[in-house]
Amino acid sequence: MFQIVWEFIVRADRVSDFEKSYAVAGDWAALFRRSAGFLGTALLRDADNPRRYLTIDRWDAAASHATMRARFAKEYEALDRACADLTESERQVGIFEDV
């Protein structure tokens, strides 16, 4: 399994909007579900900092993720732009594989 982990610091006044977009049934998961190989997403909120979140997007293989990015590049970029004002910061923590 191929997993991508992102960290976000969410704007205090946009927490609800962020959770709607990044949740299991949110906008990002809806886009990813259009592509073969998507296994699901998780949204985690930091217990000590309620504005800090992690997402974990799971794919069957790196190639499936790459195919989605190529096939839905315009939709991905549009959604990324639409969500940009929800956060103060965003960073990719890493890409992980099951061992």
Image (cartoon, rainbow, N blue to C red):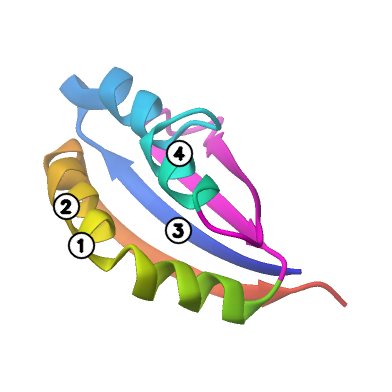
At numbered mark 1, what does the secondary structure look like: helix, strand or loop?
A: helix
Disc 3 vs disc 4: Cβ atoms closer than 8 Å?
Answer: no
Q: Residue 57, position in %: x, y?
A: 57, 55
The mark lying in front, picked from 3 and 1, is: 1
Disc 1 vs disc 4: Cβ atoms closer than 8 Å?
Answer: no
Disc 1 vs disc 2: Cβ atoms closer than 8 Å?
Answer: yes
Residue 30 vertical position relative to residue 97 in the rendered view, above or below: above
- In this picture, which residue range is highlighted in magenta? 35-60
Q: Is residue 45 magenta?
A: yes
For the residues labelled 1 and 2, the Cα–Cα distance comes to: 6 Å
Q: Nearer the viewer, residue 89 or 56?
A: 56
Mark 1 residue crowding within 10 angstroms, few (<14) / some (14–19) / many (20+): few
Upstream in sequence: badge 2 or badge 4: 4
Residue located 61% across and 79% down the image: 62
Mark 3 residue type: Trp
Which mark, residue 30?
4
For the residues labelled 3 and 4, the Cα–Cα distance comes to: 17 Å
Mark 2 residue type: Ala
For the residues labelled 3 and 1, the Cα–Cα distance comes to: 20 Å
Q: Residue 29, position in %: x, y?
A: 48, 42
Residue that carries the numbered disc 1 in the rendered image? 74
At numbered mark 4, what does the secondary structure look like: helix, strand or loop?
A: helix
Query: Which residue sits furthest right?
Result: 99
Using residue 64 as the reference point, say whether residue 22 is left or right of it: left
Residue located 16% across and 52% down the image: 78
Mark 2 residue crowding within 10 angstroms, few (<14) / some (14–19) / many (20+): few
Mark 1 residue type: Lys
At numbered mark 2, what does the secondary structure look like: helix, strand or loop?
A: helix
Residue that carries the numbered disc 3 in the rendered image? 6
